[in-house]
Image (spheres, rainbow, N blue to C red):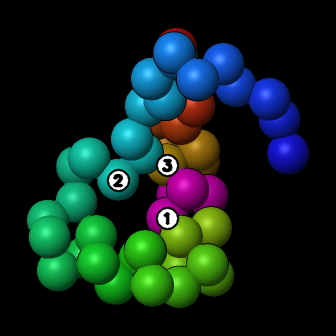
Amino acid sequence: MVRVPSDRALPDPLVGLGEPERSRVLRSETRLLDHLDRLARRGLWPPR
């Protein structure tokens, strides 16, 4: 866990997903981690 100031907006790594896929990913921690792993392998996460 990290501390993030409350006035700082965090990027949304799920912004590129359609609503059905976004809902599916948000319901499962495993699916969320898989999605973030795919983004990291493609060099898309974390944003620079």
- Eyeballing the image, is 9 above or below 21? above
Mark 1: which secondary structure? helix
Does the segment drawn in magenta span residue 11? Answer: no
User: In which image quadrant can residue 37 be found?
Assistant: bottom right
Eye-nearest disc, 2 or 1: 2
Q: Of marks 2 and 3, which one's residue comes earlier in the chain?
A: 2
Q: Which residues are magenta?
A: 34-38
Residue bearing mark 3 = 39
Alpha carbon distance from label 2 to label 3: 10 Å
Closest to the observer: 37 or 29? 29
User: Residue 45: x percent and y percent?
Assistant: 53, 36
Task: Identify the residue at horizontal 17%, vertical 80% (top origin).
Answer: 20
Q: Amino acid at mark 2?
A: Leu
Residue bearing mark 1 = 35
Q: Are marks 2 and 1 in contact (CB under 8 Å)?
A: yes
- Eyeballing the image, is 21 above or below 48? below
Instruction: Please indicate whether residue 33 sits to the left or right of residue 12 in the image.
Output: right
Q: Of marks 2 and 1, which one's residue comes earlier in the chain?
A: 2
Q: What is the magenta segment's predominant secondary structure?
A: helix
User: Residue 7: x percent and y percent?
Assistant: 51, 15
Mark 3: which secondary structure? helix
Residue bearing mark 2 = 14
Q: Are marks 1 and 3 in contact (CB under 8 Å)?
A: yes
Task: Identify the residue at horizontal 61%, vertical 78% (top origin).
Answer: 29
User: Residue 43: x percent and y percent?
Assistant: 53, 34
Alpha carbon distance from label 1 to label 3: 6 Å
